[in-house]
Amino acid sequence: MVENSATSNLVYVYDLEDGWIEARLVEQSGADAQVELEVDGKKQICKVDLKQYPDQVLPLQNVDENGKLVPVEDMVDLPYLHEAAILYNLKDRHVRCLPYTRTGDICIAVNPYMWMDDLYSEDTRERYAKHYVYSGQASNIDPLAPHVYETSSLSFRGLVFDNTNQSILVSGESGAGKTETVKILMRHLASLSGLSDEGNESARVVKKVLDSNPLLEAFGNAKTMRNDNSSRFGKYIQLQFSNTTTSPLQVNCSLAGSMCETYLLEKSRVVGHTNGERSYHIFYQLLGAPDDYKRNLWSGLANTDVESFNYVGYTDTHSIEGLTDAERWPKTVASLAQVGVEGETLRELMKSICVVLQLGNLVFEPDPDNEDNSVITSDTELDALADLMGVSNELLSKSLTIRTMTARTEVYKVPLNATAAKDGCDALAKEVYSKMFDWLVGAINKATSSNNAKSRIGLLDIFGFESFEVNRFEQLCINYANEKLQQKFTMDIFRSVQEEYEFEGIELADVTFSDNSDVLNLVEGRMGIIAVLNEECVRPRGNDVAFVSKVYTMNKENVTLIVDKFHRDYEFGINHYAGPVVYDSNQFVQKNMDTLPTDLLECVKQSSNSLMCNEFSKKAPEPAAKKKTASRRTSNSLVSQTVWTKFKTQLVSLMENISSTRTRYIRCIKPNQQKKPKVMEPISTVEQLRCAGVVAAVTISRSAFPNRLSHHVTLEKFASLCSSKVVEYHKEEMKEDEDYIEDVNKMLSVLLKPFEDINKGSQSFVCGKTKVYFRAGALEYLEQERINAMAHRVIVIQRIVRGYFERSKYVNLRQITIKVQAKARSTMCRRRFKTLRFAAIKSQCVIRMFIALKEVNERRRERKAIIIQNRWRMAKAMELFRLYRNAAVMIQALARKAIQRPVYLEELKEFRENQKLENQLVTLQRKLEEAEKKRIEAEQKAEEAKSAAPVVVASSEAPKAETEPVAEEKAAAATAELTAQQQALMDESGKMLEYLRKEVFKLRSQNSTLRHDFDLLKENNQKLMDANASAGASFAALNNHAKQLTKGNQKLMAELAMQKQLVSNYTLEQVELKEELKMKQATYIAEVHSRLQYQRTMTQIVDIIQMRCRDDRLVDDILALSDDCESDYMNGPTGIGMGGMGPSSSSGGGMSDMFRSFGSATNSTPSRGITQRFMSFFGSPTNEEPEPPPPQSTQSRNAFGLQTFSGAFSET
């Protein structure tokens, strides 16, 4: 921020990125100055060249004593008036959500990009209406805050009390808020008519007028890169009022109707739009309608969306101003019903829109049999379109692919190629939509207009200035209209004031302003762009390149025409008031003609859609003026049908209507391109201010005199303010205005002397020839002084009357007054006592307070000391506590160790016993196994003993009786002993073995399950490995295939480039051969003419010799010599035989091939005449019979030869 102590050196410095930035002047020497800037929060010292600033002075800031900006509502009141001050004043108000600023009579509206309810509430409307319409005081006395309601209120006031038609011109760039401003004005003007009863007829008229505006938006607005709801046409809405006001005390002016005129609808948007934009809203609303309605309207519309139609296509924007297209559809239908479009009429209107959509789905391709012809390959779409239009499929197809041409009395059909057929289809779609739009405007006017209302207020909402990367015919028309409006603004604001002051003999400082007369002369001059373009449209072979060439040739001295060597042959540039614009003239001639082919026109006339049929059957209006000659009449008729001529006629009519009214201006400013609230881009805003002429307008308003009165009215109103010594005025004495000038000068010099002193001596008034002109505030000052003087006289009269009444009360109140005084003195003494007592008590309180404060401080000190001691003791106790705690932990550990050790030893003993038992179990198992072995061995031995017993008996019977019982006893004893000892172990071991078998079985089962799972995992793993290997192989194969495809693609691209180069070379060779053919053809024609002249001369010589020579032999020799000369000439280097053509004769092309047969014919029959040889070459083929020889007379033979020769060349 700048320093508060140096407000006089706070300035603005120009910057290329930020426009104007705040700075503080540090030092100035000559043409250089040093300023302090704040860049990224840091202060820097920069050097400034003062030569780049007007008068070599930096513009000062409008700040107060603290260095803060002082914003104003009317920029005429800015102390320091310049471009930077205007910019920062607008920026400050824009950030504070104050979009409107006054500049004299001009209202500047900065688009806030948000709706503010308080700014447009009903209370606000009534406040502005009461102040500017119904109060009866001047509009510049105690004005309210700037608002568009001020402009509409003043227009309504001028209409009602002055009985003068009004116009409000709303201008600005696209996206600056012009359309929304016009809607706000319409609503306010409708409310000013004083309608409170919604049921009366006037209220219904108001509703129709207000509801018609959304209809025009639906059919004429579209989303662009700059604005989501941009008007793609211009409109001049005339609100018609029925004014029967007879007294200012009772206003009786109601809205009776409206009339709308439209200009230059952007028809090209019907068939295409750039990415990020949309076509007209009605297409999206119709496609967003309920499916039942679409199905009942047309079966082809069922289950469709925006991507089903090529003219509409995909869009990422589905809502405009907070409402979707489906939500807007019922509102549009309701608005159509308000103006009488409902039922079958609405159905036919929507079907016409469907026709436009369906035309975009037709596909045209070259005819396979002939590429110069075209066919419609989308049969389904064609059938649907024919059914929708109510015409036959064959008629519609022929109308789109064949063009009927008329040459004098002959009519013939010309097939169209695919491109021309598609262009014709687009032209039909654009014309249908344009006709429907014009019909809708007419329907709205029919429903809302009034024939009895003569008073009107016009609201002009026309397209803003446009400049894109590629600017075409539509942008040139739009910018031309803005140039005309800018000229009107310049004339109204600047020239009219200057001319009036010059007439009155008042000196006015020169004010430089932008005059666009050169641009208008370039566009609409005698040799301007309009005239050249219309001439190209009339010329048979007129084209865009020739149009641009003529524009440069005929207007090379015009400084507004940009001449750039880098421009292409179809480009030209114009320096408009808003900046330079380069235009692309492609299709200028075609778009300017804008004629629909007869075939398509007749096809539409046969449609079953009565709305389309009636609109296309209407005849175009005839030209106003008719010339005498037929050629001139035809030329004027063609010119009158061009788009630009129609638009110029409409624009001239518009300017005449505006010129006949009291015009007020609203300049709309677009603060930023991102459409963000409370954000202003300085560079673009400054450019708009320059284009709008706001700086010059403010300068004029400041330097001019906004208020004026006639001389005798001035004397009549203000002569009573000064003494009779200065001026004597008698109302009954009537004088001329010039006789009052001296008296008015004397009177106002005295009365306005204090006002001039307040304004630092500036002249506050000027006397003209017929009027007195006052500076801003001077007339208000005189009015206030006049009111004060009258108020002073009234006060004197009131003082005398009141004194009489009050003196009678004085005597009665005197005694009462004495008593009251005594009581008052007593009260005063007691009050003084109470005051002293209160002071003493207060002093005691202060002393006690100091004592208590001292005691409090001591107690606080003692408390803090106790806290410190407490902290120190706590620290010592904590240290001792930690020591004791560590010792207790140590003791507890030892005690737990002593308690747990016996338990540990007992558990260790038990563990060892368990180990011993386990060892014993193992030993028992081993013993069991050994006992089992012994048992088995014993059993085997017993078996062996049993088997050996018979052998012993057979050997000796005596020992058997003795030994057998003993052996049996021993065996039984051994077996019993063995069984008794091992039975217990056998049982225990059997149980143990059974348990172990079960465990083994379980483990084997688990092992088997795990093995099976392992096998499955192994198998899956193998499959995965195989699949991975297969995928790797496939990937490698695909990779190799992709590389091969890439190489093949590169080869094909190289071959394609070579083929394109060959095609280009062939094209160049073809062009060269065509040029050579034209040159040779011209040479041959000249040679043939010379040969015919030679033949005529030779024939005349032979005829003279035959008539005058008497020697027949000499005549025969001369005839033979003539034939030889003719044969030699025909075969020579200049003859038709082309024997000496040089290099061209050896080539395969050229005229030598064309005349080779002719040369051979002349060589084979040298005796034949030139006429017969011409006939043999240009006549019938060789297999046909030759025609009879020509007549032998000289004249007939020459005529016959010329006729044959000319006919032959016309055929070739």
Image: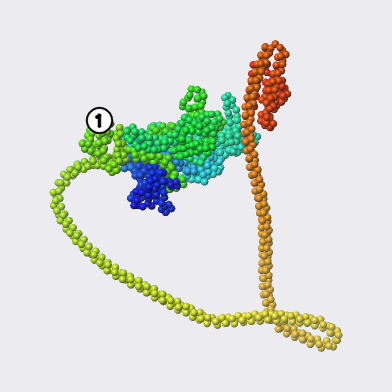
Q: Quadrant of residue 298?
A: top right
Q: Position of residue 787 (x, y in %)?
A: 25, 41
Q: Position of residue 1172 (x, y in %)?
A: 69, 21
**At 35% across and 42% down in the image, what residue appears?**
76
Q: Is residue 997 above or below residue 1177?
A: below
- Is residue 1204 shown left or right of residue 733? right
Q: Against 1177, is 903 above or below?
A: below
Question: Which residue occupies 69% across, 12% down?
Answer: 1109
- Residue 697 x %, y %: 38, 39
Q: Is residue 1124 left or right of residue 707?
A: right
Count of numbered tags: 1
Q: Nearer the viewer, residue 323 or 550?
A: 550
Instruction: Check the image and report above or below for 828 versus 1063.
Output: below
Question: Is residue 342 placed above or below 97 in the rendered structure?
Answer: above
Q: Is residue 1023 visible?
A: yes
Q: Quadrant of residue 418?
A: top right
| Residue under the image location 15 percent in, 48 percent down | 810
CA neighbours of label 1 inside 10 A, class few (<14), some (14 to 19), many (20+): few
In the picture of the structure, the residue carrying the numbered disc 1 is: 734
370 relative to 945 in the view: left or right: left
> Which residue is farthest top?
1110
